[in-house]
Every structure is written in structure tokens, then in C-alpha cells.
Image: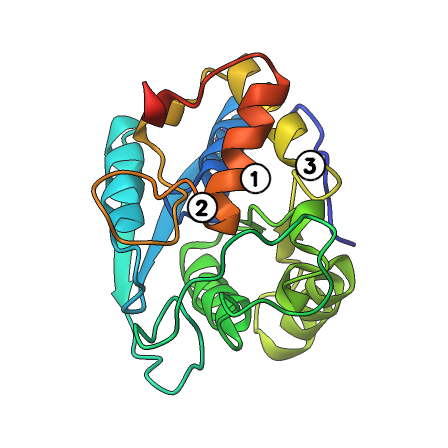
Amino acid sequence: MIKNSLPGNSFMTGAVILLSGGLDSAVTLYYAKNRGYKLTALIFDYNQRHKKEMDSAVRIARLNNLKFYVIKIELDWAKSSLTDKRIKVPINRSIESKGIPLTYVSGRNIIFLSYAASLAESIGAKSIFIGAHIQDYSGYPDCRPQFLKGFEKTLGEGLKNKGIKIVAPLLNKNKKEIIQLGLKLKVPFEYTWSCYNGNKKPCLKCDSCRFRIGAFEELGMKDPLLR
């Protein structure tokens, strides 16, 4: 069962978190930390266009005194605008857009969760935290609840140690609700990075920028990266 809420009595329970450096993974980290989990972070370098997110991930991990691993993998075959600079990052897509966007990286969460499962089993952790959420459902098949549930079942069949859970606390939240939760948890949003383009400042045009900026505006706030 994929959990989007947890019991309060989890003090110092070991867990692995997939930490991208983006807004969603940062809120997930602070959520798990607030519940008392002792986290180990996995940060992935897959030659993504927006490598700046890795710097954010490392900074947030260090800020929280987490042990972390930066994993270098090659996905040269992926036909994604995040890994192939010949493909332009799409702009002006609406939240309601159908179909899988060019920013989809084939099998990314399958790969990331496989590494997380290996780490979790090795250190005796019983939970893997991931920042997947409802706003990604239509575009990214590896963020859907049925995928996460199926993968958790696969872990039960393929690992020596049984009972490792995939925990997605943001699963039923949109971007506005995620930011609201992050504000309560005192997430340093100024240290996060969401833009798909690898520039010094957010491009303001890609999906990730617009959804993030729009959510802050809905809350009557300015994205701290734009101040």
C-alpha cells in the first residue's frame, strides 16, 4: 500500500529519500524529518540539463545533516529534452495538457527507486520517500499511484528483506498545497531549484517554472527565487 500519511510514532526510524533539489522533494524531506525519520538521501546525476538542481539537493542535504550519495548514471539513449540538448524544453503547456511531455525521461523513477531499494535493504531502512504528486499524474507514468503500488509489490518479491514501503506523502496534493505544507514545515524554498533549463536564473517559461510560480502567486506570495 502506498502511504500518503504516516503514524506519528516513527522517531529515528531509518528511511531513504530521493532528493532532486526541487520543491517537491524538499517538502518531502522536511515532512519525513518532522515525523522523526533518520534519512539517507540519494541524489542522481543523469546528465540532466538542469544540473543546478543537484547543487540544491546537496545544499539541502547538508543543511539537514543528512548522509547522502550522489549517483552518476548515463541515460544517453533517453529521448528527453532534459538529457538531449538538441530537444527544446517545451513551454506554455497547461496543467490540463494530455500526453507525455518531452521532459519525460524513460524509466527514470524505476531506476531511482531500484537504487533506493538496494540502499534501503543494505542499511535496514523500511521506507523509501518520493515526492511524486497528483500534478504529475497525466504527464509522467512513473509518478502514478498504480506504478508506485506495483513497484512496492515488486520489492516484496525481489528483495531478501521484506516490507520496504514506498511513501509518497504528497501524492494527493497539487503544487499550491505542497507549498502550503512546506511553509508549515519551514522548508527553505530559496535553496530549491525547479527550472528545467540549466541557467543561472529560472527561465519563467517551462512547465516547472510556471506551475511553481503560479502556485506561489495563488498563495499571494512571490517565488523566493525571483526576489
Residue at 33% over, 40% down? 202
Three-letter amino acid code at the position of disc 2: Lys
* SS at badge 3: loop
Check if mark 3's residue and mark 2's residue have beta carbons within 8 Å: no
Q: Considering only vertical position in the picture, is 221 above or below 61?
A: above
Reading the image, the residue beneath label 2 is: 205
Three-letter amino acid code at the position of disc 3: Asn
Residue 48 picture quarter: bottom left
Q: Considering only vertical position in the picture, is 114 above or below 59?
A: below
Q: CA distance from mark 3 to mark 2?
A: 19 Å
Residue at 71% over, 67% down? 147
Reading the image, the residue beneath label 3 is: 174
Residue 71 is labelled as none
Check if mark 2's residue and mark 1's residue have beta carbons within 8 Å: no
Percent position (x, y) of residue 60? 31, 33
* Closer to us: 193 or 31: 193
Three-letter amino acid code at the position of disc 1: Phe
Left or right: 42 with respect to 62? right
Q: CA distance from mark 3 to mark 1?
A: 10 Å
Residue at 30% over, 55% down? 50
Task: Specify the quadrant that holds the C terminus.
Answer: top left
Residue 72 can be seen, yes or no: yes
Sooner in the amino-acid sequence: mark 3 or mark 2: 3
Task: Specify the quadrant that holds the N terminus.
Answer: bottom right
Reading the image, the residue beneath label 1 is: 211
Residue 170 picture quarter: top right
